[in-house]
Amino acid sequence: MSASLETTLDEGGADTSGPRRALAHLALVTLGPILAALVLSGLVLLALGVDPFAYYGYVAQRGLFSWLGLQQTLTRMAPLLCLAAALIVAFRAGIWNLGIDGQFLLGAVTSAALAPFLITVLPAGAVLLVAAAGAALVGALWSLLPALLRAYQQVNEIITTLMMTFLGVSFANLLVKLVFLDPGTTVPQTRTLPVADRLPTLFGTTISGGLVLGLVAVVVVHLVMTRTAFGLKLRTVGESPLAARHAGLDVPLLTVAVFAISAGFAGLAGGIEILGVHGNLQAGWNPAYGLAVIPLVFLARFNGFAAIVFVFFYSALMIGGESAARRIGVPHYFTLVLVANLLILLALAEYLDHRRRRAG
Amino acid sequence: MVAAPSVPLGTMQAAATPARPVPATSPVVELLGVTKRFPGVLAVDHVDLALLPGEVHALLGENGAGKSTLVAMLSGLVEPDAGRIRVAGEERRIASPRAALQQGISTVFQHVMLVPTLTVLENLVLGMSWWRRPDRAELEQRLAGIRSAFGIALDLDQTTGELSLGEQQQIEIVRALLRRSRVLILDEATSMLTPQGADELGALMRRLVKSGLAVVFITHKLDEACRFGDRITVLRLGRKVGELAPEGLAAMDQAAAVEEVVGLMFGDRSIAEARAPRLRKAEGSPVLSVRGLTVTGATRLARADDVSFELRPGEILGIAGIDGNGQKQLAEALAGQRTAAAGSIVLDGRDITRAGVAERRRLGLRYLTDDRIGEGAVGGFPVATNAVLKEIGAPPFWSGGPFLLGGIERPGRIAAHARELIDRYDVRTPDEATPIGRLSGGNIQKVLLARELSGDARVVVFNKPTHGLDVQNIMASRNRIAAIADAGLAVLLISTDLEELLDVADRIAVMAAGRLTGIVANDEGARARIGALMIGRAA
C-alpha cells in the first residue's frame, strides 16, 4: 500500500526538490501505517458489532474536542512524556531499557510515601521538590543492577530490565501494603497528599503542572542527545562500543550513566503522576504506561518533538477510550489493540520501504 | 548454516564416481574476474580460478588474502559484485548454500557444522527428505562403497559430539560424497588436526581426486599447500598473485616449490618500485621508549610479552610477523586501550604507562587501527563527526566546556574542519555530511589518517594500514607514511606485508608469539635476516 501511494505522489507532485520529497516520504511511511491501523481496528470493531465511526467519533470528541476531555488528555501526557524522555536517552545510546514500568512504579511509591509525611514538616514547594527528586533517585537505583551487569559483564539488559520490572511491581505492592499503609482507610493505599498541596495546575484549568515538566524533559533530552558533547558520547557508545573505546571513552561508566538518567526519568514520571493527579498510591495500581510509550518512541524514530506529537494523540486515545469503555461498552484495552495493529503495520511499512529502496 | 538440499535416498548413486563425469581437461567450476567489496574493504579483486576434476587445488594466502570470501562465493554465502561463475561450462548464479549444493559444490567449513547431540546417521540424513524414513540398509550399502573406495569407516550409531574433530570432519566429507558432489571445498581443514591427522587428510584427498572429484584445499600453511596441492594458487590482499600448475610443481623438489611460493606471497614488486627512496633518517634522542611491555591476551599467541624498543623522530620502525602474534595487543597497549601488566612506556621523557587514551592522544601519541569501520569509525555518523570523534567536547568544535554537558556542538566549525581535511587529504566523498560507512576503504582510511595527524602529533602507530585497500591506495598510503616520517614524526608500522616494511621502514622487528624476536636494520640482506627471524633460526 505504501509503495503505490508513493508512486502516485511522485507522478502528481510537480515539486521534486530533495528535502521536501524526503519529508513527504517520511510522512508517508509514518502516517500511512496510522491510517491503515485505524482501518484495521475499525474492522475489529465491526466484528464486535460496534460501529467504528461512532466509536472513533466518540473517542475524538471525548479526548480532543471537549474542553474537559482535552484537559484530561494534557494531564495524562505528563507521565507519558517523562517516560518518552527516559526511552529516548536509552535507545539513542543503544541501551534497551524495557524496565521503565518497574522504575515508574517505585518512583510513584517513593513520592506517595514521602509527600504526605513531609507535608507536616516542610512547605509545600519543598515537599514537591524532595518527593520528585526521591522518585527519580529510587527509579535510578532500581536500574543499578541491570546497569552494572551490562556495563561490566555484557549481560543483555533487555532480559534483566524486564525481570526487574516484575520484581519492581511486586515490591511496590508490598511496600504499599506493609510499610506505607494508611491506617485511616480500609482500602490498602498510602496516605493521601491534600489536593491543595499537589503540583499546581496551569492557568486556572485542571491541567497538571506535570505537563510542563514532561515537555521540558523531552525537549532537553532531545537537545542534549543531538547537540552536546555528552550526547554525542552516548550515541557513539550506542552505535559502536568498540569505536567508543578506541576514541578514549569510558564505555562502562557512560553505560551506567545512561541507565541512571533513563531510569531516573521513569521514576520521575511515577512521582509526577502521584504528586500531580492521584495524591496517593493504591495497592495493585499499575497503569503499565511504559508498554504503550515504547512503540510511540519507535514511531517517532527517537525524535523528541515527534514523540510529543505522538504522545498527545495517544493520550487523547486513552482518555477517549476510557470514556468509550463506560458509554459504548468497548473495553479500554481496545486502545492497546489499536497500538498493536499500528506496530505491526509500521513494521510492515518499514519492510516494504526498505525493499523498494533496495530494488530502486 | 548450510541448508542441505532434499535428495531422496533412493536417487543416490554410488559415491565413487561423480554424477556427470567431465573430461579431465575442462574445469568443473570456473570463477572469472570475480570481485567482492565489503564496507571499507576490497576483499576479492578480479580473481580467476578454475577447478579441475582430479586435482587438489590449494588456495594459499594469509589472513585477509580473500580465501574465505572465495569460499563464501563458491558455497553460496555471498555473491560476487562483479565477475562470472561457470559450472560445467554454463554460466550460473550461486545465490544460496542450497544452490551451491545443487550444483554439486560441497563445503567442509573450518568449524564443524554438525549437530553434536545427534548420531552420525542422523547427521548424515539431515537435510534429506523429511517426509520419509531414511533407508538405513541402503545407506549402509553406500557407506560400504565409500569405505572400500576411500577408507573412511563410520559408526552410524555413535553420538557425533563424542567423536574427535578429525572423525567429525570425515562425517562431513562422507556427507558431501553422499550428495554426489563434484567439488569438495575444505576450508582450513587442517587447522584443528594433529600433524598426523593432517597427513591422513592429505592421503584421503589424494584418493578423493583419483575418483574424479575436484578438491579445493584452503590453507595459510605453506608446507601443506606444497605437500598436498597438485596446483597452488596464491592470494594476496584479495588478488591472485600467482598460480603454480601441476606440470611446474612436478618438476620442482619441495624446497624449490616453497621458495617459488614465498616469492609469490611476498614479492609484489609492482607496488614497491614506483616509490622514491626516503631522504631523511632518524635523528636525535628517542621520542618513545618502551621497556618490557607485557599485555595479557585471550590466547597464548595474542599477547605482548616483554616488548622493548625505542623510536626516534623521523624514523619508521616496522613490526613484521604472522597476523595474530600480539601485534594488535601491542598497538592497543601503546594507544592506551589496554592496560599493561608490566613494563613502561615513556613519551618525550614522560611516563605514560598509566595514562588513558585521551591523554596519550593529547601528548601526541596517535593510533591508526586496522579495523577501520568496526573500531576506527562509526559507519552511520557523518564524515565530519568521525573526523572529531576522538576530540568530543574539545574546543573549538564544542563550546561551553564541562559545565554544559561537555559543551554545545558547533556544527559550522566541525563541518569546516572536515572540509579542510577532505581537501587536504583528497578524500573522495560527496560532502562532509555523508555517512562515513558509504565511502570506500581507501577514503575511510584517509579520514582516519587525517584525524590522527591533526593537532600536534609526535608518534603514530599504524596497524596494517594498507590492509584491504586497492593498489593505488596502498601506494598512496605508503607514500604518506614515508612523508609523515620525513616531516619528523616517529612511526611504528605494524604490517603482515613484508614487502611493505622493506619498502618504507628504517628498521624492522619481527614479532612472534607476543615477543620481539629481533630488530634488524633495513639494508642489503635484510630480507634474508628477517626470513631467518620469522622461522625462528636466529634470536
Image (tube, rainbow, N blue to C red):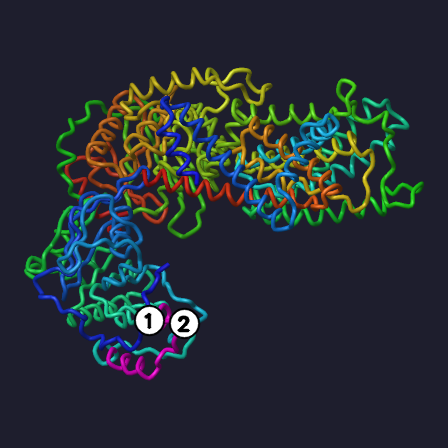
Report x, y in % for residue B418.
Answer: 37, 20
Report x, y in % for residue B186.
Answer: 26, 61
**Quadrant location of residue B119?**
bottom left
Real-space Cα distance between discs 2 and 1?
9 Å
Tag 2 and tag 1, C-beta contact below 8 Å: yes
First in sequence: mark 2 or mark 1? 2
The residue drawn where x is 37% and y is 50% is B301
The reply to whether residue B364 is in sight is: no
> Left of A89 or right of it: where is B158?
left
Q: How many marks?
A: 2
Relative to residue A338, is residue A276 depicted above or below? above
State the mark number for residue B171: 1
Q: Which residues are magenta?
A: B123-146
Question: Few, some or many C-alpha atoms within 10 Å of disc 1 (few <14, some 14-19, many ≥20)?
Answer: many
Secondary structure, mark 2, is helix
Q: Nearer the viewer, residue B531 or A183?
A: A183
> Left of A227 or right of it: where is B7?
left
Q: In the image, what residue type sits under mark 2?
A: Thr
Q: In the image, what residue type sits under mark 1?
A: Ile
> Left of B304 or right of it: where is A50?
right
- Residue underneath mark 2: B160
Secondary structure, mark 1, is helix
Instruction: Look at the image and tell me in which quarter the N terminus of chain A lies.
Output: top left
For the residues beneath circles 2 and 1, the answer to whether they share a chain is: yes
Identify the subunit bearing mark 2: B
**Quadrant location of residue B198?**
bottom left
The residue drawn where x is 78% and y is 39% is A109
Report x, y in % for residue B365.
Answer: 40, 27
The reply to whether residue B170 is in sight is: yes
